[in-house]
Image (cartoon, grey):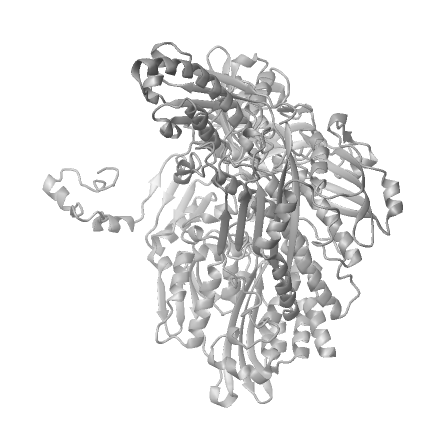
């Protein structure tokens, strides 16, 4: 009763009969519980709460609201916040503490929805979802057809804002107020501005209705001003149709954003409303409204000078060209705006898309007037005879439209090889899986937040907090001076890095101190208020690999890890017919973007011991780092890791400082300390994938055969060595997929004053794979050869040739190439490209420990050194345990799988666990477990035979109970150390990707991807499919979407998910086909299996190559319109984001097309 809240409003002293009458009726046949009407009424009433620290008011009328605001003015109250759903804090973080909140949800005037013949009025507190619903249902008979069209398209555009669950909470008024006060790049403001919307605002005691344009243009409203409602007029034709021939109202909205269906701020948004008339003289634009927003200006604007120029003019190509010239001086992004030239090109492209179809086929234009929508125009070539709207990003299905997954199952080692569901999947999906931050806080627990440097190289003189700031709940500031042992925050086999900067900070983002407070919010707010006093005199930081090269700032690469040169480079160059010298490639970084950011909980234990719960891929080294920092023996520290919410390499070395910082603070304060690093701080400190600069010289024959290649590679390792010396060898492994003739290289691992880079999924291999394809494509472009059929060298032996040929057939590659050529000939503003690439990826196994214990009831407990990161390690280990123990061959072994539980990693329970990395930990853990089971099977088999002689057949539970009672050792531990024959092996795969680019916006759509990947004999095809698809999609992020920008000092400027865009459901391939090849038996590997975690990521280079092919088609077309740029030789950056693609397609493509049209 209390859980349902049904007794919440029972009055004291009421009899039972009265109380029962208030309860909802119950029917045994009806499982639906009826929410009580009296409670519905109660939920509509506001409530007020007061405490010493905070006040919450919920006025139920405008009069009450005005009194609250007036009372605050009399008390000089400034720390007040007016809220409804408060979703805005997701973008504008609360850096100060408010002690008063005023909730507007219960004021009726703010939730009103009214419709009449003049239009629709929507209260400011109405959710965006409700506003969309209202506009879509605008079917009142008093509304004109034109008005209904406008309302529908406004609603359609709003559905691309944020995400569904956010639109269900966010309010339309809050969005507009953020646009007015804080210059938020609002879509709603732009589209409503185009339809002459009005707003009602309340300022002090004054109530006024003003145009939205005036509202946006006013100085930011103070906190006493409240937006009440928005009025959207119902549009009608303003001229007599009979006197003007055919007259129509056109309305379109536009949006260019990294994600087609929302959840991404736009590069630009626009909305155009125009009334046009068709007569014998042509098409006249009677009047128009042209609005542009989100392009680096304070608020959305109307392009009035363009409107005035176009009004009352007959449209033709020359008029449109002149209008665009005026637009060029109208849409001017402010200084400091990213991609300003791109944003201007978007504005021009949007206007062109809106008006040019009216000029395309004037003889056929009359058929348009019966449709009520300019999308019904019979466009000939501009729309490719198939496109209904050039910039309609929902032309394709926005979600995955089809997929095929092909696997070959094997029952040889059952249940190994079965595609069983991943262990813990249900717990994760339901939110019941316990991660570090889900562990309940112990009594007296404190929370930490890092204070980090904002300078790349400086002496730290002092740390203070902003004057007048409130440091509620702050307990202590921990720095290097508080460390009892070594100042060490992380370590690898190559070296260590400090936990905190001593006196000299050596990179922006380096940890300087830890704020410890009573809550995570208080700790985070205090860290944001920290002010560091620096001394930068006579210090010259190294911020690029070029500077590092000039100043010989390098980390040493052990000779055993440095790959060997192949052949004689100079001889190979002498044999070449053609040569390319000193071509450059630059590759940026990538953030890990795990769902769970870095987290740890440290709890002091008796006898000077410390228990640390850590989200880490490397518990063993985390354990050692903590012990060194605290200055205690290793047996005084225990690191426990149950599961990690995504790692991708970022939870290996980079998790150590978080755990060590918590342990140090807990050690000093003798209280539990925990930390959950916020996303922005995590992005600043993570380091990410290694950026690189590659300079290459290559010689090749006229038929495309490469005779020599030299690579000079500068790798940005950052300030600490981490695992960076491993990268040269990894890169060389990926390059081996082609025969380069002679191969020479000079690879430098550069030490710079930037955050240290660490291992990220396929470290070095993904860059190596890209470098190989970039060189091949450059050679092919010089020779005007087809990249696919003239790749350098022959495919390697083993399964790669068969994979390559099979993929060509299964993906209909050659047939699609011909279709694509026809498509590109028929479409001016959409171009397609296709690419097929192979991979060769070497992986290495590591020593891994395992322990298997059988309990008295027959249930089985397994511990392994490997960590469950979401990659299905526990699932494969569970299957291997069931298989290996089933070799005892007794009754009930078919049910062993359900008796196995894999438990958390504990560094004092199972030592020598190693790191979970390199794609091979699952199979290493499986082999360690198999060896434990072999020991147990050997012990139990002899015991079973004696029992069978006495009892006949025997069941598993009976066997174990008898063994338990007979003191048979039912626990076994092993350390799997791979021998030289199984230490490393090669993985093979190939992918075909086809893309379509929008020449006007640079938007790329991946139409189809086909992958064939050799998994050996898969331990679990379902898990491996997930790994292949997930790795490929993460590769799409690297090659297409994920910018990881920094300022001039090297400090990361990405603002979490607002500016850093990982792939989502609307940016993955529309058709996604994956086949796992079972390549047979490999006696030197774990049950003939092969890795699947990292190699498929490198296949995503096929998308980048396909984009390049599409851009090449666009450039050839652009060249035909006039210009001297090369259509085939160009550099496509990584990531190939929309501005990059558009720039290569021609920022002035519309102007050049119009000039060409006028001239011809």
Question: Which residue occupies 80% across, 54% down?
Answer: 703
Residue 729, percent across and down?
71, 33
Which is more toward the observer, 128 or 67? 128
Towards the viewer: 298 or 161: 161
Residue 441 shows in this picture: no
| Up/down of 764 relative to 845, above or below | below
Quadrant occupied by the C terminus: bottom right
Q: Quadrant of the N terminus?
A: top left
Is residue 1056 found left or right of 46 in the rendered image?
right
Q: Is residue 456 left or right of residue 40?
A: right
Looking at the image, which is closer to me, 808 or 436? Answer: 808
Relative to 949, 687 lies left or right:
right
Dividing the picture into quadrants, the one containing residue 795 is top right
Image position, residue 1106 (x, y; %): 65, 55
Q: Residue at x 73, y 28 (%)?
A: 561
- The x and y percentages for residue 243 are 50, 90
Residue at screen point 36% across, 23% down = 890
Residue 656 in the figure: left or right of residue 328: left
Residue 189 against residue 870 in the figure, above or below: below
Q: x%, y% of residue 1159?
A: 74, 78
Q: Is residue 1007 visible?
A: yes
* Whether residue 481 is situated above or below residue 454 in the rendered picture: above
Q: Residue at x 52, y 13 (%)?
A: 636
User: What number of labels is visible?
Assistant: 0
Location of residue 814 with respect to 699 vertically, above or below: below
């Amino acid at each position: 009763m209390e859980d349902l809240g049904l007794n919440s409003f029972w009055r004291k002293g009421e009899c039972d009969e009265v109380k029962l009458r208030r309860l909802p009726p119950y029917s045994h046949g009806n499982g639906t519980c009826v929410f009580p009407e009296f409670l519905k009424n109660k939920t509509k009433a506001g409530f007020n709460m007061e405490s010493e620290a905070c006040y919450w008011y919920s006025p139920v009328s405008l009069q009450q609201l005005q009194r609250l605001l007036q009372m605050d003015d009399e008390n000089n109250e400034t720390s007040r916040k007016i809220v409804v759903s408060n979703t805005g804090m997701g973008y504008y973080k609360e850096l100060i503490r408010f002690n008063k909140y005023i909730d507007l949800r219960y004021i009726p005037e703010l939730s009103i929805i009214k419709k009449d013949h003049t239009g629709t009025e929507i209260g400011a507190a109405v959710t965006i979802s409700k506003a969309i619903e209202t506009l879509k249902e605008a079917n009142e008979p008093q509304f004109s057809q034109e008005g209904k069209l406008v309302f529908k398209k406004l609603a359609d555009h709003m559905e691309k804002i944020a995400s569904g669950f956010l639109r269900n909470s966010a309010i339309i008024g809050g969005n507009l107020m953020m646009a007015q006060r804080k210059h938020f790049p609002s879509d709603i403001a732009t589209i409503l501005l185009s339809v002459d919307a009005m707003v009602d605002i309340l300022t002090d005691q004054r109530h006024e209705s003003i145009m939205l344009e005036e509202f946006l243009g006013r100085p930011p409203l103070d906190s006493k001003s409240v937006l009440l409602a928005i009025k959207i007029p119902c549009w009608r034709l303003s001229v007599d149709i009979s006197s003007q021939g055919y007259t129509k109202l056109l309305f379109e909205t536009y949006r260019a954003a990294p994600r087609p269906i929302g959840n991404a701020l736009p590069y630009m948004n626009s909305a155009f409303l125009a009334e046009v008339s068709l007569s014998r003289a042509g098409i006249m634009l009677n009047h128009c409204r042209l609005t542009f927003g989100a392009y680096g200006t304070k608020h959305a604007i109307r392009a009035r000078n363009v409107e005035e120029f176009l009004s009352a003019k007959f449209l033709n190509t020359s008029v449109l060209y002149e209008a665009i010239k005026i637009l060029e001086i109208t849409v001017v992004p402010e200084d400091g705006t990213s991609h300003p030239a791109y944003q201007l090109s978007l504005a021009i492209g949007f206007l062109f898309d809106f008006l040019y179809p009216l000029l395309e086929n004037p003889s056929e234009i009359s058929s348009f007037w019966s449709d009520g929508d300019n999308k019904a125009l019979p466009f000939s070539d501009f729309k490719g005879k198939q496109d209904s709207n050039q910039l309609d990003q929902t032309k394709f299905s926005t979600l995955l439209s089809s997929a095929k997954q092909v696997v070959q199952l094997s029952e040889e080692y059952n249940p190994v090889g079965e595609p069983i569901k991943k262990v813990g999947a249900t717990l994760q999906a339901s939110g019941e899986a316990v991660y570090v931050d889900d562990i309940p806080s112990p009594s007296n627990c404190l929370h930490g937040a890092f204070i980090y440097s904002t300078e790349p190289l400086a002496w730290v003189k002092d740390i203070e907090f902003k004057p007048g700031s409130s440091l509620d709940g702050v307990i202590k500031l921990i720095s290097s001076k508080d460390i009892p042992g070594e100042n060490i925050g992380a370590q690898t086999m190559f070296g260590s890095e400090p936990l905190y900067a001593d006196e000299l900070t050596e990179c922006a983002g380096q940890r300087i101190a830890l704020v410890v407070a009573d809550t995570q919010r208080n700790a985070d707010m205090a860290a944001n208020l920290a002010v560091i006093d620096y001394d930068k005199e006579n210090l010259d930081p190294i911020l690029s690999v070029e500077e590092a090269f000039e100043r010989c700032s390098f980390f040493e690469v052990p000779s055993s890890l440095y790959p060997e040169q192949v052949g004689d480079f100079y001889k190979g160059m002498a044999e070449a017919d053609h040569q390319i010298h000193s071509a450059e490639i630059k590759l940026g970084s990538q953030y890990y973007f795990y769902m769970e950011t870095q987290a740890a909980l440290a709890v002091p234990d008796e006898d000077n011991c410390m228990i640390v719960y850590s989200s880490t891929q490397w518990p063993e080294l985390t354990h050692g780092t903590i012990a060194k920092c605290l200055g205690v023996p290793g047996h005084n520290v225990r690191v426990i890791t149950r599961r990690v919410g995504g790692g991708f390499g970022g939870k290996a070395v980079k998790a150590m400082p978080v755990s060590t910082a918590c342990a140090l603070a807990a050690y000093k304060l003798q209280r539990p300390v925990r930390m959950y690093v916020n996303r922005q701080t995590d992005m600043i400190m993570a380091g990410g994938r290694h950026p690189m600069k590659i300079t290459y010289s290559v010689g090749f024959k006229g038929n495309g055969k490469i005779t020599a290649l030299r690579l000079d590679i500068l790798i940005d390792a950052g300030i600490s060595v981490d695992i960076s010396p491993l990268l040269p060898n990894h890169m060389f492994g990926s390059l081996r997929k082609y025969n380069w003739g002679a191969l020479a290289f000079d690879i430098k691992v550069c030490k710079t004053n930037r955050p240290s880079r660490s291992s990220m999924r396929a470290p070095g291999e993904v860059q190596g794979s890209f470098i190989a394809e970039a060189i091949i494509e450059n050679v092919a472009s010089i020779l005007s050869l087809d990249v696919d059929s003239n790749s350098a060298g022959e495919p390697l032996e083993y399964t790669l040739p068969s994979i390559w040929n099979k993929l060509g057939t299964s993906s209909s590659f050659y047939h699609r190439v011909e279709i694509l050529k026809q498509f590109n000939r028929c479409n001016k503003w959409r171009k397609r490209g296709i690419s097929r690439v192979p991979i060769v990826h070497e992986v290495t196994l590591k020593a891994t420990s395992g322990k298997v214990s059988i309990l008295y009831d027959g249930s089985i407990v397994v511990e392994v050194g490997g960590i469950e990161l979401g990659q299905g390690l526990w699932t494969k280990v569970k299957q291997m345990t069931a298989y290996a123990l089933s070799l005892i061959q007794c009754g009930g072994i078919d049910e062993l799988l359900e008796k196995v539980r894999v438990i958390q990693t504990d560094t004092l329970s199972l030592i020598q666990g190693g790191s979970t990395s390199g794609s091979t930990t699952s199979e290493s853990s499986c082999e360690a477990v198999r060896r434990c089971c072999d020991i147990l099977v050997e012990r139990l088999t002899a015991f079973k035979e004696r029992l069978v002689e006495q009892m006949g057949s025997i069941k598993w539970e009976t066997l174990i109970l008898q063994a338990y009672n007979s003191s048979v050792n039912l626990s076994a531990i092993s350390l799997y150390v791979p021998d030289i024959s199984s230490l490393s092996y090669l993985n093979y795969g190939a992918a075909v990707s086809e893309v379509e680019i929008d020449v006007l916006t640079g938007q790329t759509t991946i139409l189809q991807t086909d992958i064939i990947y050799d998994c050996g004999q898969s331990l679990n095809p379902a898990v491996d499919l997930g790994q292949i698809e997930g790795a490929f999609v993460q590769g799409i992020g690297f090659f297409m979407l994920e910018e990881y920008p920094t300022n001039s000092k090297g400090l990361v400027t990405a603002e979490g998910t607002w500016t850093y865009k990982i792939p989502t459901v609307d940016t993955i391939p529309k058709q996604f086909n994956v086949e796992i090849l079972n390549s047979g038996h490999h006696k030197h590997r774990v049950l003939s299996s092969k890795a699947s975690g990292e190699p498929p990521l490198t296949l995503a280079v096929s998308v980048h190559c396909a984009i390049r092919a599409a851009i090449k088609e666009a450039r050839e077309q652009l060249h035909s319109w006039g210009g001297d740029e090369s259509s085939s030789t160009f550099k496509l950056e990584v990531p190939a984001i929309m501005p990059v693609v558009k720039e290569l397609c021609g920022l002035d493509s519309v102007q050049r097309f119009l000039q060409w049209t006028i001239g011809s």
